[in-house]
Image (cartoon, rainbow, N blue to C red):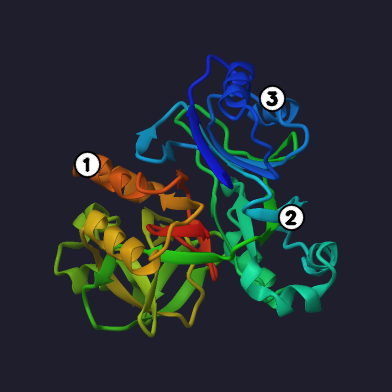
Amino acid sequence: MAVKTVLIKGTDSQDMARQASEALAGFQPKLLLFFASSIYVHPEAALKEAFPGAEIIGSTSHSEYCNSDFTDGAVSIMAMDSGSVEDVCVRVVENISSDPDLRGVLEEMHGFFGGVDQVLANYESYVGLVMFESSAKSEEIFMDRLGTVTDLLFVGGSSSAADSGESLVYANGKSYSGAAVLAVLKTVNGYDVLKTQSAHILSERKLLVTKSDMRNRILYEFDGRPCGEVYAEVLGVPLEKIQDYFVSNPLGVVADTEIFVRTFNQIQDGGITLHCGLPEGTEINVLEIGNIVEDTKKALDDAITYEPAGLINFNCLYRTLEMQKENLVGPYCELFGRYPSIGFSTNGEAFFGHINETSTVLVIK
């Protein structure tokens, strides 16, 4: 078996790791990916002790998915052996808010596999995972810089946390704040990536971002006017009611048939904060959220026409909350129960940039 997935609730991290070791007895993972509720203290150290021969990466989570199950207060684990992942290279980039130069890191990662020419000559086998510690709020610039130093595709998500927990990312027995964990996987049978945002264009009217604070993710103006005023105008609702529509009517950067979602967060300092920044000069459309279950089923059915080894689902926390409100979590999880799969509710997704209110799925063939 190339991939095994388990969902564990332990009394503490040591108990969780013990249960994981029992569930995976006889399995020899090259890579162990986990999403752990932030109620667990140092799950990374416990798992490293239980699986000393594996590369281990992960992040904290608000809530966890595994196969057809959804819960919180648990740890969702995917173990991949040499039948699915031939090799893996892991690096941690700390202090990402200081805009680090990524060239040296990616040169090391390319070199691990024999150099950039070797990687690009076998592009269909190599894929990158990236997990951000979300409090740094630096994903946009990081992904932009990553794209300038490698042609490898990186997908992933930003850490979330339970209400009383701390947001962290993990790599090989250590925990990190304000950091990004990078992993390049050399897959045995290749991979696919799919993205579904369950959002559709509400208004064909293009809005131009004319004033924004990218670093602090604050939007001030569309078309030279206060952004809230223009947003209310497009929706046809009173200005004082716009916060009620932030999740149901996000913004979208539309490129051909692809939509990259940005969601308003709260009114602040004469502008509106965003979960993903928008630079000045960007054109957007106002969107509306559709049927998450139907849209996700279509995306999965269209992309996966074979028997995959496993799926990793980076699913926006806003989507989780919307599904809980509409009582759709069960039908949604049934879609992923068709495959060995894990996932968590993210604070943003990575796919050619930083986006949110999206499900980004890495399929290991």
Q: Which mark is residue 325?
A: 1
Q: CA distance from mark 2 to mark 1?
A: 41 Å
**Callout 1 amino acid:** Lys
Q: CA distance from mark 3 to mark 1?
A: 35 Å
Does the rendering let one see residue 356?
A: yes
Marks 3 & 1, CB-CB < 8 Å contact: no
* Picture coordinates of residue 127, whole percent (x, y): 63, 64
Secondary structure at numbered mark 1: helix
**Callout 2 amino acid:** Asp
Relative to 204, 25 lies left or right: right
> Which residue sits at x=70%, y=45%?
30
Residue 137 location, quadrant: bottom right
Q: CA distance from mark 3 to mark 2?
A: 23 Å
Marks 3 & 2, CB-CB < 8 Å contact: no
Question: Which residue in the structure is indicated by mark 2?
Answer: 87
Q: Earlier in the sequence, mark 2 or mark 1?
A: 2
| Of labels 2 and 1, the one closer to you | 2
Relative to 300, 281 lies left or right: right
Crowding at label 3, few (<14), some or many (≥20) Cα neighbours within 10 Å?
some
